[in-house]
Image (cartoon, helix red, strand yellow):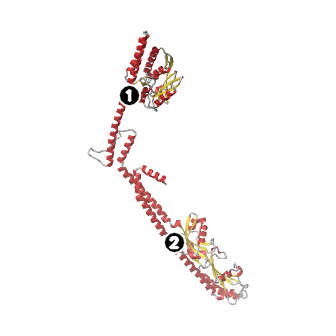
Amino acid sequence: MKYLLTKMKKLYRNSRISQKLFLAFSMMIAIPAIVVSFLFIRTQESQLYKDAMATGSSHVSRINEQLRSKMGIIENASSTALNQKAFVDFIHSNMRGDGLRLVKFRQNQFEQMHNIIQSYEMISELSFYVDNPNLFEIWPEIYHYEKFWPKDYWVTLREEGGAAYRLFAFKDGEHTLSYYRLVRLQGQQQKLPTIMEIRAQHSVFFSDLLEDSGGDFFSVVMDGADSSRSVYNPEHIFSRNAGEELDKILGSIHQRLDVLQQSSPIKVKVGDHTYYALYRYIAPLNAYVVDIASHQALMKGPRSWYLLVVAITLCILLLMLLLVSHTTRRIFRRLDRVLVSMRKVRQGQLDAKIDTGLDKNETGDEIDEVAVSYNNMLDEIKHLMTQVVDKQLIAKNAQLHSLHSQINSHFLYNALESIRMLAEVQRQPGIAEALVSLGSQLRYSMQWRSDTVALTEELANIHSYVRFINFMEGGSIELTADLPQEVLRYTIPKMCMQPIVENAVHHAAPSGGSVSIQITVSVENDSLLLIEIRDDGAGIDPEMLSSLQAVLRGDSDSPIVTSKNGLGLENVHKRIQLHYGKDCGLWIDSVQGAYTCVTIRLPWENVNLGGW
């Protein structure tokens, strides 16, 4: 949690000002508006649910009353039929004994009974099942008891008070409701009592329930004992939407039906959908009148309100975003110029000042004040940088002149001292040649037209130096420098190679001995020119070599001193780094008794030297 908060703070800190303003406006306006809207919709949902339950309860009560009214009509019809005493007596008598009597029965009592049946449109059929061996089955209203099933049903009728309804009739009762009633005749001793059956088609008896094919509530009459036996309109939109799930829905609701809790709605969930059910128990039918509604159907209005609220909110947020962007763009346009100028300065453009457009006497607002202060700061930075550069140039020139003086004075002193001693000891014509070589070196060392010379000039001075040394010390110093013509034109710092050769002469070979010095060049990574001065002399003591390398790396503050008369390599190393930076300079590698190799690292700038 702490990590998440830290991450959010960083994200907020790095966001643009326009984004922060948009977030603030959203939290102050949009979010409260959404919360209030959703609370209002929830209140409307609650009220809608209450209204729907009240409407459904009223509808169930009305259907209950209608069904009880229709049952009353059936019961009245049965009473009227049983009041036809002559008809009832005749069907229990010997109907086969007298044909004239049967004809009169057909014209009088039967016709009257038939008219009674016809007067009730709801009744589709009225039948008597009589246990009379002399019964004549010539009309559909009169049957022998053998045609009734189940034969022991009269026991159930007797236990229920002599009459009972069945939501689904025994005979072809898939779409028929039946009313059964015991017919008892005084003085007769039949084996089985007579049963009267009045049949009414579901399409007529439940016409009000089955004709409704729309609306949120789906009306069903469920058998109280069997959840699979129900009467409903299969064309209702609820039934079509439920499809194969309808049986599961009805079964789930049937399990929750309770005669003692008829006023409370039932809530069941089948699959991903929730359903509400209101019901009333019809005792004579042993059935329930149930109104079922889907939660999604009841709340389709509020759900559309949710979408409307979300759409309106998105539009408001979009307008707010546009307004904030436009406002911040106008307010912070000059601040953006400050940021652009800062980015340019960060890239090294110190002249990227901000154009405020103010007159001399104008002060402007806070952003103008920032811009003016920023411009003054840039001027001050440029002034300070100029001072720093000037100081660095003065220091560099002073160091260079100091180094030049050291090189000139030491070299000239050593040379003159050698000639003086030689002239005193031995007067020979060879001194003339030595003086020529010495003159060349003096002219080269004393003429400093610039800090750099061509490699060929430095190489010529080294050759003069080697000839002079061979004459002075009688040694045999061999110098090899077979370099390409292109590299001879390469510009290098003056007197950067001669001190190295001098050290090789004085330290690599014994007095009067010989040593071979080889000068080669190579290119490293197309960025550095490497000049290697290698001798096959005595090499350097490992401890001394480690000390020299530490100084060249900058890891030691001790100066490099090779001998009391020899020029320290540190001067050459410092000169190269003052000219070209820390990546350039000297590097020494040596194996005692084998060789010493000093590498001069200079920047590679001559593109025409590749491939040699």
Q: Position of residue 99 (x, y in %)?
A: 71, 87
Q: Earlier in the sequence, mark 2 or mark 1?
A: 2
Q: Please tell me whether mark 2 sits on a helix, a strand or a loop.
A: helix
Q: Nearest the camera: 157 or 332? A: 332
Q: Please tell me whether mark 1 sits on a helix, a strand or a loop.
A: helix
Q: Nearest the camera: 543 or 87? A: 543
Q: Nearer the viewer, mark 2 or mark 1?
A: 1
* As drawn, 552 above or below 112: above
Which picture quadrant has residue 127? bottom right
Which picture quadrant has residue 199? bottom right
Q: Position of residue 284 (x, y in %)?
A: 60, 79
**Within 10 Å of the Cα at label 2, are there few (<14), some (14-19), or many (20+) other Cα atoms?**
many
* As drawn, 294 above or below 69: above
Q: CA distance from mark 2 to mark 1?
A: 102 Å
Name which residue type carries label 2: Met
Q: Is residue 94 left or right of residue 548?
A: right
Q: Which residue is mark 1?
A: 399
- Decide if residue 308 is in sight here: yes
- Decide if residue 139 is in sight here: no
Specify the farthest residue to the left. 361
Name which residue type carries label 1: Gln
* As drawn, 38 above or below 286: above
Q: Are marks 2 and 1 in contact (CB under 8 Å)?
A: no
Q: Position of residue 308 (x, y in %)?
A: 46, 61
Q: Which residue is mark 2?
A: 53
Which picture quadrant has residue 68? bottom right
